């Protein structure tokens, strides 16, 4: 059955879209973005960031930040993820992204099946990053920002392959984690990292 396109349930003058990147990795912050796009001059090629190549994401990122009415990136740190759990940290980061917008949205469309607790009217849209343009734009911004940060972390903490795996638990990453131990950006509440924590943090960091 084809996925039905989504429309707001009410008349909306300022629609914000929100998405996150980084719930699953073993390392790094979870990053969210909120975006408000203009009604006129739509951005061609918007799609779920995971369905795009790195070059496509970079090109669309530049177009989004140039033409969006406003946008903002939120995040939750590794310490917050470990303290509150990844779901609550993600919802926290989403709130920060929307609160940072320079325009007050009258409706917020969030990718997934959970809405943060906030004062905004909104709806959680399953597979929204492939159905709602403002969510697609948010997913692209969050993905490009987080990927860039993880490439920077690869320079700071070499040996884990952060430039390629972006913190996800690939075979290379797990082997390095066992051999080198966790870095300060590893999520110790995640089981593969927790199992290595008894060996202590790598003396290199």
Image (cartoon, rainbow, N blue to C red):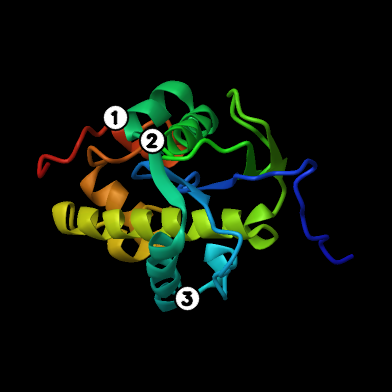
Q: How many marks?
A: 3
Residue 33 shown left or right of residue 46 in the figure: left
**Mark 3 surroundings within 10 Å by alpha-carbon count, few (fewer than 14), some (14 through 19), many (20 or more):** few
Q: Which residue is identified by label 2? A: 195
Confirm or deny contact between disc 1 and disc 2 (CB under 8 A): yes
Specify the quadrant of the image occupied by residue 9. top right
Mark 2 crowd level (few <14, some 14–19, many ≥20, 10 Å Cα):
some
Q: Is residue 118 left or right of residue 147?
A: right
Q: Along the polypeptide, which appears first: circle 2 or circle 3?
A: 3
Residue 4 position within the rendered picture, expressed as x and y whole percent measured from the top left:
83, 60
Mark toward the viewer: 2 or 3: 3
The residue depicted at 45 percent of the width and 32 percent of the height is 99
- Distance from disc 1 to disc 2, alpha carbons, whole Å, reads 7 Å
**SS for dot 1:** loop
Which of these two is toward me, 181 or 43? 43
Pointer 3 residue: 53
Secondary structure state at the residue bearing disc 3: loop
């Amino acid at each position: 059955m084809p996925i039905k396109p989504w429309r707001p349930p009410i008349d909306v003058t300022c629609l914000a879209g929100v998405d996150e990147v980084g719930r699953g990795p073993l390392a790094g912050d979870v990053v969210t973005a909120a975006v408000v796009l203009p009604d006129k001059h739509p951005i061609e090629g918007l799609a779920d960031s995971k369905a795009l190549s790195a070059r496509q994401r970079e090109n669309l990122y530049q177009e989004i930040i140039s033409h969006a009415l406003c946008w903002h990136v939120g995040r939750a740190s590794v310490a917050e993820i470990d303290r509150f759990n990844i779901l609550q940290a993600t919802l926290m980061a989403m709130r920060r992204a929307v609160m940072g917008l320079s325009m007050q949205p009258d409706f917020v469309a969030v990718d997934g099946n959970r809405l943060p607790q906030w004062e905004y009217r909104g709806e959680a849209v399953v597979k929204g990053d492939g159905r709602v343009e403002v969510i697609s734009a948010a997913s692209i911004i969050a993905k490009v920002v987080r990927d860039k940060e993880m490439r920077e972390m690869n320079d700071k903490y070499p040996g884990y392959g952060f430039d390629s795996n972006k913190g996800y638990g690939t075979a290379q990453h797990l082997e390095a984690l066992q051999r080198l131990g966790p870095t300060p950006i590893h999520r110790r509440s995640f089981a593969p990292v927790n199992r290595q924590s008894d060996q202590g943090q790598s003396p290199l960091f």
